[in-house]
Image: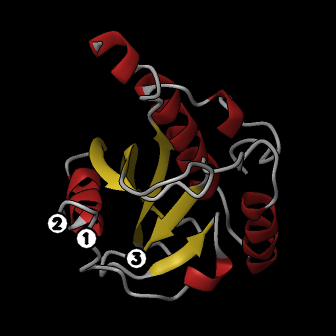
């Protein structure tokens, strides 16, 4: 394997801006490209879903198939195998389509509004980074996504 999956260069809890988000996702990509066995894949599901280096609250990784189906959702196993290609944010942006397009550009950021379960209310600003990688197990292209919620709690105070 490319690196120890329990020690990414940037952990989920260290994601605070675009730079750390990109490093977190790219570290996940590096690890995923090195997976070669079904045993490692099974271990991956447990590692990516447990609170720790690869998941911290609402910061986690999602693996998508290029048709918009979720292969692994680090935050909610119930979403695995769901096809989310037409899912929209609170303002009508087709989020999964945007993420797939960003990955197709060689890796890029997507901003959208999403419900943060840790915060009261809906449509909180979220930034995600999506990148395409070739599965070391299947040899097929997949998309890895990670995101974080922007803290806008002090914006209203600054405007007043």
| Tag 2 secondary structure | loop
Label 3 vs label 2, nearer the camera? 2
User: From what the image shows, is residue 69 above or below residue 124?
Assistant: below
Q: Residues within 10 Å of mark 3 (few under 14, many from 20)?
A: some
Tag shown at residue 65: 3
Q: CA distance from mark 1 to mark 3?
A: 18 Å
If the image is split into quadrants, where does the C terminus sit?
top left
Residue 138 position, x and y percent, is 53, 77
Tag shown at residue 62: none
Q: Are marks 2 and 1 in contact (CB under 8 Å)?
A: yes
Residue 14 position, x and y percent, is 66, 27
Label 1 vs label 3, nearer the camera? 1
| Tag 1 secondary structure | loop
Query: Which residue position is annotated with label 2?
Result: 92
**Front-most of 77 and 10?**
77
User: From what the image shows, is residue 156 above or below residue 159?
Assistant: below
Residue at left offset 61%, top offset 51%? 58
Q: Residues within 10 Å of mark 1 (few under 14, many from 20)?
A: some
User: From what the image shows, is residue 104 above or below residue 151?
Assistant: below
Q: Is residue 64 left or right of residue 100?
A: right
Query: Which residue position is annotated with label 1?
Result: 88
């Amino acid at each position: 394997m490319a690196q120890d999956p329990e020690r990414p260069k940037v952990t989920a809890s260290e994601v605070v801006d675009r730079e750390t988000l990109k490093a977190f996702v790219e570290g996940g990509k590096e690890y995923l490209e090195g997976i070669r066995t079904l045993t490692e894949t099974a271990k991956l599901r447990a590692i990516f879903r447990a609170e720790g280096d690869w998941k911290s609250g609402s910061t986690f990784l999602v693996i998508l198939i290029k048709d918009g189906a979720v292969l692994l959702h680090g935050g909610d196993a119930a979403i695995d195998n769901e096809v989310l290609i037409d899912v929209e944010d609170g303002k009508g942006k087709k989020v999964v389509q945007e993420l797939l397009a960003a990955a197709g550009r060689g890796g890029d950021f997507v901003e959208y509004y999403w419900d943060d379960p840790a915060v009261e209310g809906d449509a909180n600003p979220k930034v995600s980074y999506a990148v395409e990688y070739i599965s070391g197990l299947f040899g097929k292209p997949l998309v890895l996504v990670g995101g974080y919620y922007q803290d806008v709690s002090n914006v209203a105070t600054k405007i007043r």
